Image (cartoon, rainbow, N blue to C red):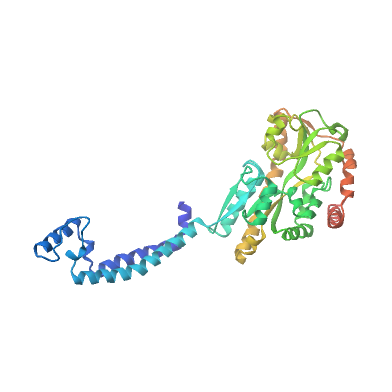
Amino acid sequence: MLGAWKRACPLRSEITRGCLLIQRAFATSGCFLLDMKPWDAVERSRTSRRKGAGGHTWSLSGFSPKAFITPNQRRQIMKIGKRFGWISAVVMFLFWTVSFAVAGTQVNIAAVTNPDFVHVKAANWFGEELNKLVPGKYDVVTHHSGALGSETQVLQQIQLGTTQMSVCTTGPVEAFVPEIKALEMPFVFPSYEAADKVLDGPIGKELAKKFEKAGFVALHFLDNGFRNLTNSKRPVKTPEDAKGLKIRTMESPTHLAIWRAIGANPTPMAWPIFTALQQGVIDGQENPIAVIYAAKLIEAGQKYLTLTRHVYSALVVVANKTFIDGLPEGDRKAFFDAARAASLRGRAFIRDNEASQLEQLKTAGMLVEDKPDLQAFRKVTAPVIDGTSGEVKKLVQEIRQVVGQ
């Protein structure tokens, strides 16, 4: 609160000036009411009664100031009333302005994960960066742990404008921006560097434009890492080992197609999934190391981890288009710049911690298959890529050219 008040410093002198004007208004008018005590009024009333001035008897119900206020004093009060009217209006306006400066315009940003995940961290970093660029103007409030619903539900809210922003995975975006499927294709990105080259280049800009047709603005891309398979049943080294496993996937047709091609029994399910894993509703799931670690899936019985790295898990800082378009030009640029800074911090967080998180999973008892038959996985999932058409197929071809495939 103190920091917010300091940000309002330029207005504090105006409030002080307003208060001094009120004080001066009373002082220069020689207002007798400033010095009068309650018993003075009673005494004046009694004196007036003795003199027969109005014949008033003192009581709370029948009290009249005419009994002890002279005509000249009444004129003073009327003058003060007029002067006080415009002064109070000015001061109220100044207080309203300070209140606005202190609180700022609230911006709601949703994330389905808990604060240990990069989604929430990036949302908080966005708020920090935005406040550096436009201090005190916006109050970014992060709603985490699925407080506003699943990622699909949040995206619907953003379309409607009831929620302004989100940091979400690109899988559910597929239902709103079909071209995003190009990022969800299996084994398209060989490395983080290749993904950065695509998303920070012309292809990333082209994909961002596709969001606008659905009422969104893609402020920037970051990532959650490469997705890997975990399960509670058995070690998985080849697609054959995964056959029949009930695997939770995101609400994405592309991810469902990938696991059907592998031979598993995919089940789309919104996050969180800890209880479903713990109770055996599903056998396994697929997610980046950062998610497997932060969600403590080893405690839900996920004993086996296979480093398939089958899909690069992109995240996007997405916002309502009408909201962004309605911002002043300088503020709009600040939103993009803050999203970029938060995204770069998010990428670094994922990559800097991945190796140590994997070691901690091993220490916790997770059995890791670090040399699966990736060629076999590529072969069985190739039809998913071959089945693309139109704009998605074109984008996949462009991505492969950029990454050298």
Pinpoint residue 59: horizontal percent, then vertical percent: 19, 55
Question: Which residue occupies the foreground of this view, 177 or 193?
Answer: 177
The residue positioned 32% from the left and 70% from the top of the image is 83
| Residue 334: percent from left, percent from top | 62, 60
Instruction: Return the residue found at the far left.
Output: 50
Q: Quadrant of residue 80?
A: bottom left
Lateral position of residue 108 relative to residue 176, left or right: left
- Please report the residue visible at 17 percent of the width from the left and 56 percent of the height from the top: 39
Residue 157 is left or right of residue 85, and the answer is right
Quarter where residue 201 is shown: bottom right
Q: Is residue 321 above or below residue 270?
A: below
Q: Is residue 256 visible?
A: yes
Query: Which residue is rendered at x = 88% and y = 49% of the image?
Result: 387
Side (left or right) of 31 relative to 102:
left
13 and 88: which one is in front?
A: 88
Question: Residue 312 placed where, x, y %?
Answer: 78, 46
Residue 340 appears in the figure: no
Q: Is residue 143 above or below residue 131?
A: above
